[in-house]
Image (cartoon, helix red, strand yellow):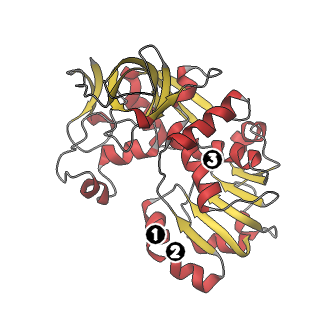
């Protein structure tokens, strides 16, 4: 089969399209013919082995242990193991492979059935493939970590990105009043997602505004968390889901201390893929409440270009990969 393979850490130039062996099935696995995948910031962190902690987590300091990256997947079931009960050959599925070995940047992948659910009937393979990682992050960040309640005011920073564009829609589904932050070129696209208010950060510094919010979901955390605390009501919550490594460690290492001295909750988290939440996203998509904002769709051979654009923050919404 064809796959995008990485043999060393580095830029997207380290990725190449190669012929490799097809994955080996077990009694517990599902073999999926991949029709589409998408790129996420997690992919280029793994590609570069940066921050260095990534190398410890995945067990290889000098060379990547994961040869084929990619965790968003949408495709058709080719075969199932004897112990599989949820799927049959021919089923259209989508899911998240981040907890079962990755491997979506290829023509075929094997995974446990718990990583997949049936694809929304209203979505193409490319649309479905952009959903799992980013939309699960937005959903769990708002609902579980942020404890979003009906009628609350939510500020979404980085609203034009992959996670942010889903967060705008999910916050509206959950009954919030949503203010979205992006640049002037992306205002109309973000407004079309259902945001009640849209702020152009090139014109307005949200940290200087008088408005305060119950919850801030930060998908573009490149400033100190202290800058954003005044935008929150007392006992309000700041949740970081994306941004620079320095800011991520600031939240993870000092979030509890900042919370105690600021009277605001400061939180980071790691998304937990699961079928229940994937089924929730599927239902919203089939009801027309949730759809991805797709910037562009590339063939598998041009995946390095797609990752390069994502690293350079040139993307609006998500980038799909057609396999």
Residue farthest left in this picture: 62
The percent coordinates of residue 154 (x first, y second) are 74, 58
The percent coordinates of residue 182 (x first, y second) are 68, 49
Is there CB contact under 8 Å for labels 1 and 3? no
The residue tagged 3 is: 164
Going by the image, does 299 lie left or right of 282?
Answer: left
In the image, residue 15 sits, relative to residue 190, either above or below, namely above
- Looking at the rendering, which quadrant does residue 281 occupy? top right
- Looking at the rendering, which quadrant does residue 291 occupy? top right
Q: Which mark is residue 93?
A: none
Residue farthest top in this picture: 90
User: Which residue is at 19% across, 51% downward?
Assistant: 60
The percent coordinates of residue 84 (x first, y second) are 37, 28
The residue tagged 2 is: 255
Q: Nearer the viewer, residue 81 or 11?
A: 81
| SS state under label 3 | helix
**Mark-to-mark CA distance, 2 and 1:** 6 Å
Dot 3 crowding, Cα within 10 Å, few <14, some 14–19, many 20+: many
Is there CB contact under 8 Å for labels 2 and 3? no
Image quarter of the C terminus: top left
In the image, residue 3 sits, relative to residue 157, either above or below, namely above
Image quarter of the N terminus: top left
| SS state under label 1 | helix
User: Which residue is at 55% across, 28% downward?
Assistant: 128
Going by the image, does 178 lie left or right of 237?
Answer: right
Dot 1 crowding, Cα within 10 Å, few <14, some 14–19, many 20+: some
Is there CB contact under 8 Å for labels 2 and 1? yes
The residue tagged 1 is: 252
């Amino acid at each position: 089969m064809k796959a995008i393979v990485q043999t060393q850490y580095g830029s997207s130039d380290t990725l190449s399209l190669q012929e490799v062996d097809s994955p080996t099935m077990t009694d517990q696995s599902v073999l999926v013919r991949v029709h589409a995948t998408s790129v996420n910031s997690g992919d280029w962190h793994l590609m570069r082995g940066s921050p260095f902690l990534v190398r410890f987590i995945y067990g290889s300091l000098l060379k990547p242990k994961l040869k084929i990256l990619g965790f968003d997947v949408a495709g058709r079931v080719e075969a199932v193991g004897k112990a599989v009960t949820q799927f049959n050959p021919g089923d259209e599925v989508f899911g998240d492979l981040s907890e079962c070995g990755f491997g979506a940047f290829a023509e075929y992948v094997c995974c446990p059935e718990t990583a997949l659910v049936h694809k929304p009937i209203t979505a193409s393979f490319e649309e479905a493939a952009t959903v799992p990682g980013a939309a699960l992050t937005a959903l769990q960040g708002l609902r579980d970590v942020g404890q979003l309640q009906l009628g609350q005011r939510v500020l979404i920073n980085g609203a034009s990105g992959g996670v942010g564009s889903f967060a705008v829609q999910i916050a509206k589904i959950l009954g919030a009043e949503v203010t979205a932050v992006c640049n002037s070129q992306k205002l109309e696209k973000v407004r079309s997602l259902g945001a009640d208010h849209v702020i152009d950060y090139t014109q307005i510094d949200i940290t200087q505004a008088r408005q305060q919010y119950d919850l801030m979901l930060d998908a573009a955390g490149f400033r100190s968390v202290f800058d954003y605390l005044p935008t929150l009501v007392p006992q309000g919550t700041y949740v970081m889901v994306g941004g620079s490594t320095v800011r991520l460690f600031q939240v993870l290492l000092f979030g509890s201390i900042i919370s105690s001295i600021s009277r605001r909750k400061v939180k980071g988290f790691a998304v937990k893929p699961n079928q229940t939440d994937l089924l929730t996203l599927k239902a919203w998509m089939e009801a027309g409440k949730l759809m991805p904002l797709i910037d562009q769709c590339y063939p598998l051979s041009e995946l390095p270009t797609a990752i390069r654009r994502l690293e350079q923050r040139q993307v609006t919404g998500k980038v799909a990969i057609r396999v």
